[in-house]
Amino acid sequence: MTILRSALYMPGINQKAMDKALTLDCDAVILDLEDAVSALKKDDARQLVKRQIENNDYGPKEVVVRVNDLNTKWGESDVAAVANAHIQAILVPKVSEIRDINRMVELLDAYGSELPVWIMVETPLAIINVNELACQPRVSTLVMGTSDLVTDLGAEHIEDRHNISYALQRSIMAARAFGKLILDGVHLDFRDLDSFHNICRLGRSMGFDGKTLIHPDQILVANQAFSPSEAELEKAKRLIDAWRSAQAQGSGVVELEGSLVESLHVEEAKRLLDFFSEVADRAD
Ligand code: COA
Ligand code: MG
C-alpha cells in the first residue's frame, strides 16, 4: 500500500533542506528543479539533486524529482540526470494533454527507465483533459498545482476554496475512476498551522490521499489529518466485530450504533485498519 499523507517540496538548490529531509517524518520528498529554482541556478541544482540521491538513503520515504517542463531548455537534461537514479517517481509539471505524458514516457523509455510518472494538474486545459491524463498507464499519482491554477484562472486564493472546488473534485473523480493516488496543492501560509489543519481536513473530506507541503512544520498536521483518528479506528474494530457476529448467527442485516452496516462499510473499515498498521510498521 502506498501511503502519501505528506509530500514535502524543497528547492533542489537548497542543500540544507535536502539534508534535513533525511530525518523528517513525511511520506514523500519532492526535490524540485522547477519553480523553486531560479533560471540561473538550474544546472547547479540538477547536479546537486543527482549527487544528493546518489549519496543518501531516504529510507521508506518516496523520493520524487520534479523536473522542468520538456518545452524548456532544461527539461531534457533534468530527465537525463535522474531517469536511472534511485528514486520512486518523476514529477512532470504543466501537463495539459496526453502528448505531454507520452513525450516524457518516450524519453524515460529511451533511457531504459521504468520510473512511474506523477503529473502536476495545474492548468485549465489539464482540468478539462484530466480523465484522459489520469487513465494513462504510466501515471501513478496526480498532484494538484493550485497556485498555478488560481493564477491561470484569474481567480483568488479563498480560505474555503469554493472557487476551485470544481477543479479539485473533477480531478479526484478522475484519479479514483482510474485507481490513481491524488495529492492536494500546497498551503502557502505555512506559519498558520490552524488554517492549515482546516484545509487538510477539507482535503481529506473531499477524497485526497494527502497534501503537498512546503515547510517541515506542516508534516505532523498533514500526517494526522490524513490518517484515521483513534475514534475512527475504534469504530472500525466495533463494526468488523458486529459484522462477524451477525455472520456467525446467519443474519445478513447488521446495525451498529443506530446505523445500518453494509458490506462496503466492512471493506472500508478493513482498509482503515490496514492503513493504520502500515503506518505503525513504518514508525517502528
Ligand atoms: N524542506 C526541508 N527542510 C526545510 C524546508 C523544506 N521545504 N523548509 C524549511 N526547512 C528547514 C530549514 O532549512 C530549517 O532547518 P534548520 O532547523 O536545520 O535550520 C528549518 O526547516 C526551519 O526553517 P525556517 O527557518 O522556518 O524556514 P526558512 O526561512 O528556512 O524557509 C521557505 C522558508 C518557505 C523558504 C522554505 O520552507 C522553502 O523553501 N520551502 C519550499 C518551497 C518550494 O519547494 N516550493 C516549490 C513548490 S510550491
Ligand atoms: Mg506549478
Image (cartoon, helix red, strand yellow):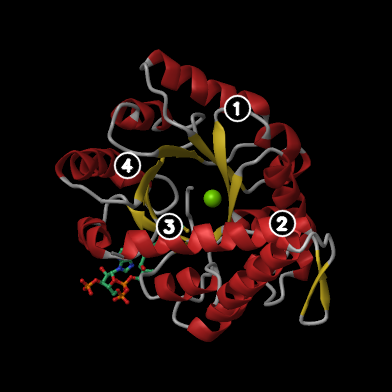
Q: Residue at x 20, y 58 (%)?
A: 19
Q: Which sits in the foreground, 57 or 274?
A: 274
Figure quadrant of the C terminus = bottom left
- For mark 1, what is the residue? 137
Q: Residue furthest left?
A: 55
Secondary structure type for disc 3 = helix
Q: Position of residue 116 (x, y in %)?
A: 47, 32
- For mark 4, what is the residue? 42
What amino acid is labelled 4 in the image?
Answer: Lys
C-alpha distance separating marks 2 and 1: 21 Å
Q: Earlier in the sequence, mark 3 or mark 1?
A: 1
The answer to whether residue 147 is seen in the rendering is no
Image-based side of 112 in relation to 256, left or right: left
The crowding category of the residue bearing disc 2, from other C-alpha atoms within 10 Å (few below 14, some 14 to 19, many at least 20), is many
- For mark 3, what is the residue? 278
| Vertical side of 73 occupied by 254: above or below | below
Image-based side of 142 in relation to 278, left or right: right
- For mark 2, what is the residue? 168
Q: Position of residue 271 (x, y in %)?
A: 59, 57
The crowding category of the residue bearing disc 4, from other C-alpha atoms within 10 Å (few below 14, some 14 to 19, many at least 20), is some
- In front: label 3 or label 1: 3
Q: Earlier in the sequence, mark 3 or mark 2?
A: 2
Image-based side of 101 in relation to 175, left or right: left
Q: Position of residue 53 (x, y in %)?
A: 23, 42
What amino acid is labelled 2 in the image?
Answer: Leu
